[in-house]
Amino acid sequence: MTSNASVCKSGQTTQSRFVLVWIASRTAVASLLIGAAVLKQLDLLGDPVAPRLLDTWLLAATLIFELSLGVLLLFNTFGYLYSKRIIVVVFVIFTCISVYRAYDGQESCGCFGQLV
């Protein structure tokens, strides 16, 4: 009986290493999204200056989206293939927003509320 997975010097198969790396990276991305959502929530609740209504709704929608996506990734709801695609698409969108805000002259992208 032969196996397709090659065995490394430490005795682990490359497939099991891949799984460990995938779990660690998925957990890191989920933690990043959940942390950003929590910091934005603190920004939304503790802002003494009342922002415009559209800004409040947009911030609340972003908060719910990031928190939901982070929890779903943490529990691996989507599976490997869809999770990878969702992560890439979401972070490409976040990067475009950050580049636009930098081009617009804003000091911070607001990714982590007013922390940065």
Image (cartoon, rainbow, N blue to C red):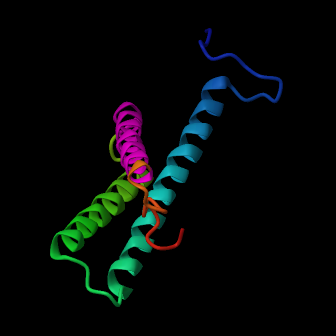
Eyeballing the image, is 84 above or below 114?
A: above
7, 105: nearer the viewer: 105
Q: Magenta part mainly helix, strand or loop?
A: helix
For residue 9, what is the image quadrant?
top right
What residue appears at the point 59 percent right and 12 percent down from the top-left corner?
4
What residue appears at the point 59 percent right and 46 percent down from the top-left corner?
24
Eyeballing the image, is 46 above or below 106?
A: below
Q: Quadrant of the C terminus?
A: bottom right
Residue 35: x and y in percent read 48, 66
Compared across the picture, whether 100 is left or right of 65 comes to right
For residue 13, what is the image quadrant?
top right
Q: Quadrant of the N terminus?
A: top right
What residue appears at the point 28 percent right and 65 percent down from the top-left corner?
64
What residue appears at the point 39 percent right and 39 percent down from the top-left corner?
92
For residue 50, what is the image quadrant?
bottom left
Q: Which residues are magenta?
A: 79-102
Q: How many marks?
A: 0
Residue 104: x and y in percent read 38, 53
Residue located farthest toward the front when viewing the structure as drawn: 105
Eyeballing the image, is 103 above or below 47?
A: above
Eyeballing the image, is 9 above or below 28?
A: above
